Amino acid sequence: MNPGMQIPHRRKSFVVGAVALLLACGASLRAEDWPQWLGPQRDGVWRESGLVETLPTNGFKYRWRVPIGGGYTGPAVAGGRVFVMDRQLAAGATNPDSPWGRGEIPGSERVLCLNEADGRILWQHEYSCPYTVSYASGPRATPAVHEGRVFALGAEGNLVCLSADKGAVLWSHDFKKEFNVKTPVWGFAGHPLVDGQKVICLAGGNGSVVVAFDVVSGKELWRALTAKEPGYAPPMIYEFGGRRQVILWHPEAVSGLDPENGTVLWTHAMTPSVRSGMTIPSPLKVGERLFLTSFYNGSILLNLVSNKPSVIWKSQKVSEKDTDGLHSVMATPLIENGYIYSPCSYGQFRCLKLETGERLWETFAPTSGKSERWGHAFVVKQGSRSFMFNEKGDLIIARLTPEKYEELSRARLLEPINRDPGRPVVWSHPAFANRCVYARNDKEIVCVSLAAE
């Protein structure tokens, strides 16, 4: 086309519209990272499109699969790289026959960086880490990746900041030594939260249940809250009453804090305290309300329209099996359009009314297939459907509605090989990025494309 030629108005409109359409399509198909726990917005929503409608009945074709050690840590995906943690036992060392056994098991933890395209290990950071935790397979917390830095928290309280490109140690902290705390029964498990120039962590102790560090220097910026045990729920940031707050839930209380200085804005006591310290699922914001759920104590919905929280409803039974409402163990529930979807204490995948806690239906289909203590599945929302990864290693596409659980497709992604609960399970949350799923068990990490062809 002659550069000086004028495009007729109609044609110009068509060209502009076509370009806009192409740009819009490109935006909708743009790859998206999964740089932290529950994804880019820390909300368990996979926002990519252009994905498969069904899963292969004859098995997945793996982009790559790479041997790694044990661990419950989910992968993080950012900048063309995959970050995951694992556990390496020392020569001659073994874990106790009973997962409840606690001693001092020699070994090390590793932070691994893999090339997203082919799974090749680009670097690894390894440090000595004798384990004293129950369920000693490996580290628990998903790394957080932010502006060229990786923040990884190990099961014994080792927080390390590494350069994402080469794995160089930029700074580190030892929670047990610095905050004079003991390792929780199931280890340090609160997934690090990056907020601007701060990384906020669940630590524990007297005045240091939650601690913020400078992302560049590692300098402590503030610490807050006291509790006998910190629990395991990750810090989250939400806005209530027009004010951004760090929400920190430990077994004795849930609090809102000013993220800039750690000032406590409000506190709601857990009565009774959460049994066995099992504050595990992430606190969830729904409008001006906050939803919490735990294995023994069940659920509570708080009204947070002011800095004086009030209870809308709560479970009446403190029980591990004879439950009311929802007693979730590890999974962060999906809440959508006024309904809650999540596994309960023995694998009953349930739907509840958010406003009242009334149970509408339950099924064992997406979890353990039958009643099993801690029967489990992680749930990630994607468009009008959900991707679920269960303890058997199955990836499931399902539609969740107030009327029913509708399974659309299912395929085995990984073999369940962790036998800590007395049966083989996979208890690691997958990552969804680049139209792929990244998942691990105690022997390998795999990547499978879920892009529509």
Image (spheres, rainbow, N blue to C red):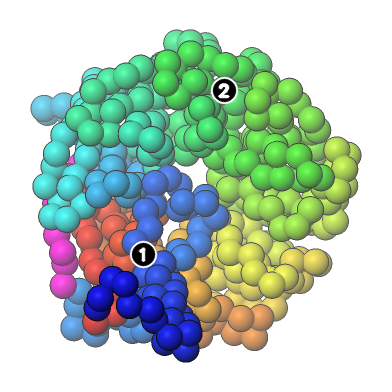
Residue depicted at 64% across the width and 86% down the height: 403
Circle 2 residue: 211
Magenta part of the protein: which range? 61-69
Circle 1 residue: 30
Say whether residue 272 is magenta.
no
Whether residue 413 is situated above or below residue 304 in the rendered picture: below
Whether residue 209 is situated above or below residue 421 in the rendered picture: above
Estimate the x, y position of residue 244 in percent, counting from the top left: 70, 39
Whether residue 167 is situated above or below residue 24 in the rendered picture: above
Report, in whole angstroms, how far the alpha carbon at label 2 lies from the one at label 1.
35 Å
Q: Count the numbered circles shown.
A: 2
Left or right, 9 with reference to 293 = left
Disc 2 residue type?
Val
Quadrant location, the N terminus: bottom left
The residue closer to the viewer here, 245 or 350, is 245
Determine which quarter of the picture holds residue 221. top right
